[in-house]
Image: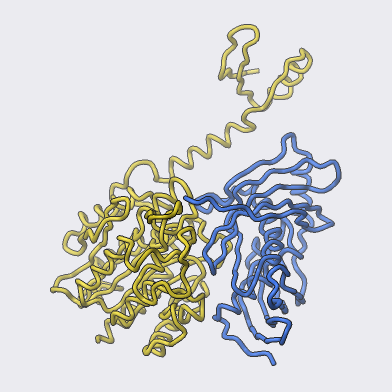
Amino acid sequence: AAMELPLSHSLASRAAALATGYLCYRRGSPGRGLALRSLRRARRQDINDVGHKYYLELELEDVLDKDSTVNCTAEVLYHLGNKNIAPDVQFTLEGELKNTDEADNIFYNRIKSPEKELVAENIPDSHGNVPPEMEPIRLLAWVASGYVIWQNSTENTKFQLAQIKHVKQVKRSDEYLEFDYMILLHDMVSQEIIPWKMTVLWHPQHGVQVTQDSRQPKHASG
Amino acid sequence: LQLDFWLAPRGLGHPVDIRVPFPSLQPLKAHLEANGISYSIMIEDVQTLVDHEQMEMLRGRRGLPISTNTFDYATYHSLDEIYAFMDLLVAENPNLVSKLEIGRSTENRPLYVLKFSNGGTNRPAIWIDTGIHSREWVTQASGVWFAKKIVQDHENKEGVASILDKMDIFLEIVTNPDGFVFTQTKNRMWRKTRSKHSGSICIGVDPNRNWDAGFGGPGASGNPCSETYHGPYANSEPEVKSIVDFVKGHGNIKAFISIHSYSQLLLYPYGYTTTPVPDQKELHEISEKAVAALSSLYGTKYKYGSIITTIYQASGGTIDWTYNQGIKYSFTFELRDTGRYGFLLPAKQIVPTAQETWLALKVIMQHALDHPY
């Protein structure tokens, strides 16, 4: 039997953050980032010998258009014991997400044939600034980090993308765009800032893929 | 062609740098290519650079502030600028504001607290601190705004003026100055103090795990390299010890509010244990009101509850200690946002954040005034 959780409960917040990250990865693009607007309902179930399952009702918002929201139900299963298995996440969106074909194609064409491959660092900068032409690069990282977050989450973590330290476009002969990112993830529970490298592939018709990712060592003195 | 040579021709084999007006770009390229002269583009658009520099210069971060009325509250400031602001505020309002040095940081920086007092002797008081975790920049910036707001309310005989008739307010804006300077010079994500304790190459103690409440228990780390390292013993950090000494020495603090970011939460004790505090019901009710007040301004949504159920188990925390000292109205805020920008909150959100948070603080302060104990 599933137990109702208070909406302010830490376990509910963590599961909701995980579900949002996964969802964002599956549905996001450089023209669409999804963030959690509010948690409407959360229930938790202990499944013997399997793990802990959360039933969530979420309201998500489009990061580029706060008035555009969509409701969603999600189920998150954290597996017992083995910490190397990513949680199972399933979701159902109620309604349509805004079409981002135009924005995606503009970005795609801008980046696809540059004279020089794109390179940037510190997005946002220390003061929270993001140059407008970098917003799609940032959203792409936000979407891709959803994958990394999903793969590495447990009931005792709550990850957010803290910053893009470095991004470099990789030239490709096929139609895909490829970027090497060095990002910083913030885990709210341990308060650690974790550097992470990820290679991200994207094409307007083929969605976002993280083809490689690896955790990086933290520096000792800061 | 109106070519502007930034590195003029010197002779054969030496490169030249040329600023090219837009209409001359194509003709020049054609000319160079036709003559087999190789070139590369160093700056795509000079105007963009000039515009950016103009903007930077207007941002008010050149030089120290001249008055608290022309101070730019909507940008992030350096430690020197904030300390200069404090002195200005005191100079402009000598009958209300004074600056106390309650100690020195590990790197020997002064730890300053602003005292707002209308008179009386050792009146019951409210304590507010910001910036205990250095990377949480919206908090120090909000602290600066709060300081000015208190002065303005007093001048206009509104808002907290009535509170100041009976109570004093203490405000420590940069509670962790060593960490703050480090976030500006070396690592924007630095959280802890900058102390070195024997036996480790790692630096710093989490000042919100260093208090004597469940110290060293679950919810803090014994690993010096961890972000939640509790330190070798309670109050090992001068940033913490100075507040402990101040609170004990004062003896009449009635509300204690420690401000952090991010997550949009209002929290009350305990963090180190699931045992509810005896005053749980009252603190929960105050939180509900405070959060409603905060939300009323811009619709910003906050959750509230005890630390351990709402965020995580944390031992050695500030408000667990202050509550156990008998300061019933002990609260922690986690300000904007919920993760979109996290610690890197855009400067344009500083003032809205400070404004809405102030409404919640007033609820707490008013309650403390109305319910003496």
Please tell me which residue is depicted at 24% across the width and 75% down the height of the picture.
Answer: B125
Residue B148 seen by the camera: no
Residue B53 in the figure: left or right of residue A25: left
- In the rendered structure, the colour chosen for chain A is blue
Q: Give A161 or A52, whichever is nearer the viewer.
A: A52
Q: Height in image: A207 above or below B20?
A: below
Q: Height in image: B319 above or below A100?
A: below
Please tell me which residue is depicted at 13% across the width and 73% down the height of the picture.
Answer: B121
Quarter of the image where one finds residue A158: bottom right
Q: Which chain is yellow?
A: B
Please tell me which residue is depicted at 22% across the width and 58% down the height of the picture.
Answer: B101
Q: Height in image: B121 above or below A105?
A: below
Q: Give B142 or B60, whichever is nearer the viewer.
A: B142
Quarter of the image where one finds residue B259: bottom left
Q: Give B328 or B51, whichever is nearer the viewer.
A: B328
Residue B220 drawn at (x, y percent): 46, 70
Residue B123 drawn at (x, y percent): 18, 76
Pick out the residue farthest to the top.
B11
Residue B68 in the figure: left or right of residue A33: left
Residue B83 seen by the camera: yes
Give the position of the N terminus of chain A as an image quadrant.
bottom right
Residue B136 drawn at (x, y percent): 45, 60
